[in-house]
Image (spheres, rainbow, N blue to C red):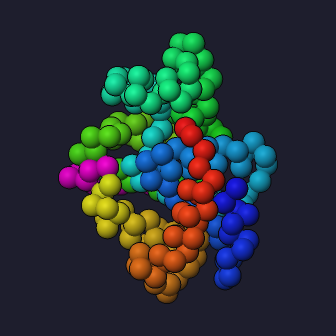
Amino acid sequence: NLLTVLKQVDGVDFSRIGMMGHSRGGMMTYMALKWQHDARRDDIKAAVVISGITDLYMWIEERPELLEKLFLPVFGYTPEEAPHLYEERSATYWPERIKVPMLIIHGEADAEVSVNQPRKLVEMLRYNGNPVDFISIPSGDHALGAFQAGYPMAMNWFEKRLEMPGENHSYEAHQATIDEVSAWFYSNYLPY
């Protein structure tokens, strides 16, 4: 649990926790928000997802090779054999369980995860009354220029949502904390 890691980081204000994830980390961000809702907690106050996976069924439809290369080796079952394994990782199946303000950023030229995935989720979140902002980057690829496009947007959005005026939002200013949390994540890596 990343909240456990944050408790060990000096200077963290637990009344203003934001979560950000990219790609699979975006899927994990959605899942963390679902867990938070189900556990009746409110630790995470706002979230940003960049190039995130929102629907494994759509992903397989867009990229059929993923079934053999990724999902069968990891899950051991097709979506037809074990739909719960796919649906519990697909935010489009439970948008009503995402209750925090969100910013979703996605590149129009993303060849890994189609921009149609977040568009579908944004529509569902808005239907459920969840405050969500969506930014599509016209020439953005999956990495959005190795985060140079997405990261500053995310930090500026967090500044407004979490009331952090005047803080330095450059990647460099936060790199040590990001590296610390990333190291914890990779040492405790869990498969899809």
Picture residue at 41% right of the left edge, 80% below the top:
172
Residue located farthest toward the bottom when viewing the structure as drawn: 166
Q: Residue 44, relative to residue 84: is it above or below?
A: below
Q: Nearer the viewer, residue 172 or 19?
A: 172
> Which region of the structure is painted magenta?
133-142
- Can residue 18 be seen in this snapshot? no
Residue displayed at 40% across by 28% down: 69
Examine the rendering and report whether any part of residue 179 can be seen: yes
Q: In this picture, is 137 found above or below 14?
A: above
- Residue 109 pos. (x, y %): 23, 45
Give x and y (percent) for residue 80.
Answer: 53, 13
Q: Quadrant of the N terminus?
A: bottom right
Question: x%, y% of residue 53?
Answer: 45, 40
Residue at position x 35%, y 50% in the image: 106
In the figure, is residue 137 to the left or right of 157? left
Query: Is residue 67 depicted above or below 130 in this figure?
Result: above
Residue 150 location, quadrant: bottom left
Tell whether 53 sits left or right of 8: left
Looking at the image, residue 159 lies above or below residue 19: below
Quarter of the C terminus within the rendering = top right
Taking the image as shown, residue 152 lies to the left or right of residue 13, namely left
Residue 169 part of the magenta segment: no
At a point 67% along the width and 82% down the height, the residue shown is 11
